[in-house]
Image: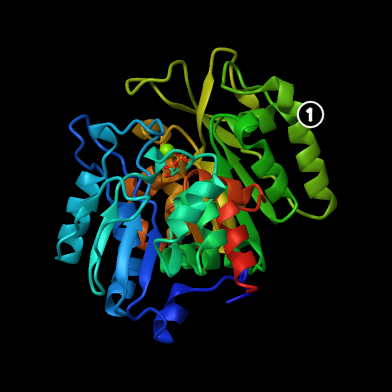
Amino acid sequence: MPEALFQVKRLSELAQAGQLKGKRVLIRSDLNVPQDEAGNITEDTRIRASMPAVQMCLDAGAAVMVTSHLGRPTEGQFKSEDSLAPVADRIATLLHRKVPLISNWVDGGFQVQPGEVVLLENCRVNVGEKKNDDALAKKIATLCDVYVNDAFGTAHRAEATTNGVAKFAPVACAGPLMAAELDALSRALANPRRPLIAIVAGSKVSSKLTILKALSEKVDELIVGGGIANTFMLAKGLPIGKSLAEPDLVNEAREIMDLMEKRGAHVPIPEDVVVANELSPLARANRVPADQVAEDDMILDIGPKTAARLSTMLAHAGTIVWNGPLGVFEIDQFGGGTKMLAAAIAHSPAFSIAGGGDTLAAIAKYGIENQVDYISTGGGAFLEFLEGKTLPAFEVLAERAKD
Ligand code: 3PG
Ligand code: MG
C-alpha cells in the first residue's frame, strides 16, 4: 500500500491501544440517504458503510454519539421531514440494539453510558453548522473526548461537524470508512500502478473540466464518454450531428489532448458510435463509423469496435479510476458501451475505484459491485478529490495528527 496522501490519526489505532474505554466518542457520519415521499429510506449503503465505526467504538467500551446531516434543511427551523428518525430505526435494526434519537443536543443534557449509542438529530439544523461557526464547533467539541470523522461523503464541506469540531476536540481521528476511502484514493492517484486509466464521462465538459485537467496530468489514458466525448470528437474535426456537445470548449479539449500527447499519454477518440434520431426507449439505434455521423444523428453511445479497443486497454491497466457511464445506459440500446467497459473493469487485474451517483447505478445495473476493488460512498466529495482539491475534512485531521 503506497503512503496515504494525508497522514491522519485512525480510530482503529485508538481502539487497539485501549484509548476509547469509558470515553465519550462523537462520530460524524454521512447518513444522508435517499428517501421516498413518506420518508422511507430507499437506499441504505451509506448507513451500512457507517456501522463499522460505531461497532468499533461500542466494542472498545466507549459511550457513543453519532450525528449526520440529512438533506439541506434551514438552520434553526427543524421540520419533521428533516428528522433522522428513520435512520435511527435503521441503525437499531442493523446493530440489534436501541438507538435513542436526541433532539436539541448542542448544549448536552442527555445521557449515554459506555457501551451505548445515541443518534444526535440532524446537525444541519443547528445554527452555524454550514458556516463552520467556531462557537458552535467549540460547544459540540465539549460533548466528547474523541471526535471521529467517518463522513467521507461530506468531506468536501467545511462545516462545524465536518471541520470545526475537529479543531477543538481533545482528540480528532478518521473512522474506518474515511480511512478506507483515503487509502483507496491514495492507492489510485498518489502512487498508482501503471498504466493508470481514468474514465470520465458525463453530459458536459464544463462540469468536469477541472477533473479532466487534473487527471490529464496524471493518467496514461483518459477515456471520455457522453457529451464530453462528443466535444473531444468535435475538437478532432469529426462530425457529431445534433449530439450534445459544448463547441465553446473545443479549444480546452484540444489543449488537454495536446498536453497529454506530449508526454505519451492519450485521450482515445471513438472510431465508431451508436446514433439515433431521438433519445427515447423506442429509438432505433444505428452503429456508424465515427466519421459518418449524419446531420440529424445524436451520438448516444460508443460503438462496439471502440468498446472492444477500450476493453483491451482496461485489461492491461494497472489502475482504473471510473467516474461516469459512457452512453445513455439507462436505455438498453445505448448501454452496450458502458456494459462492455463494466465487464472489462470487472475482469481486469487492475486496482479499480469508482464513484459518483450515475456510476454506482451502472455498476448496480451490470452487477459488478463485488468486482470493483473500491466503490466510493462519496458523490461530490469523490469528484472534488479527483479535481485535486484538498478536502476540508482531511486537511484538519492531518493537521491534528501532528499534535
Ligand atoms: C452528498 O449527498 O453528496 C453528501 O451527503 C453531501 O451533501 P450536500 O451536498 O448536501 O453537502
Ligand atoms: Mg446531496
> Which residue type carries mark 1?
Asn
Q: State the residue lying farthest toward the right.
A: 262
Percent position (x, y) of residue 283? 37, 20
Residue 175, visible in the rendered structure: no
Name the image quarter holding residue 318.
Answer: bottom right
Ligand 1 shows up in which quadrant of the image? top left
> Which quarter of the image is occupied by the N terminus?
bottom right
Left or right: where 76 falls relative to 389: left
Q: Give the residue drawn at x 40%, y 30%.
A: 74
Residue 365 vs 276, above or below: the answer is below
Left or right: where 276 falls relative to 399: left
Q: Total number of numbered labels?
A: 1
Q: Nearer the viewer, residue 190 or 41?
A: 41
> Which quarter of the image is occupied by the C terminus?
bottom right
Name the image quarter holding residue 126.
Answer: top left
* Residue to which mark 1 is pinned: 251
Residue 357 vs 342, above or below: the answer is above
Residue 178, visible in the rendered structure: yes
Q: Give the residue drawn at x 51%, y 69%.
A: 170
Tag 1 secondary structure? helix
Percent position (x, y) of residue 351? 53, 66
Q: For the residue carrying disc 1, how many other residues have a C-alpha within 10 Å: few (<14), some (14-19), or many (20+)? A: some
Which of the colour schemes (rainbow, by chain, secondary structure, one colour) is used? Answer: rainbow
Left or right: where 184 falls relative to 68: right
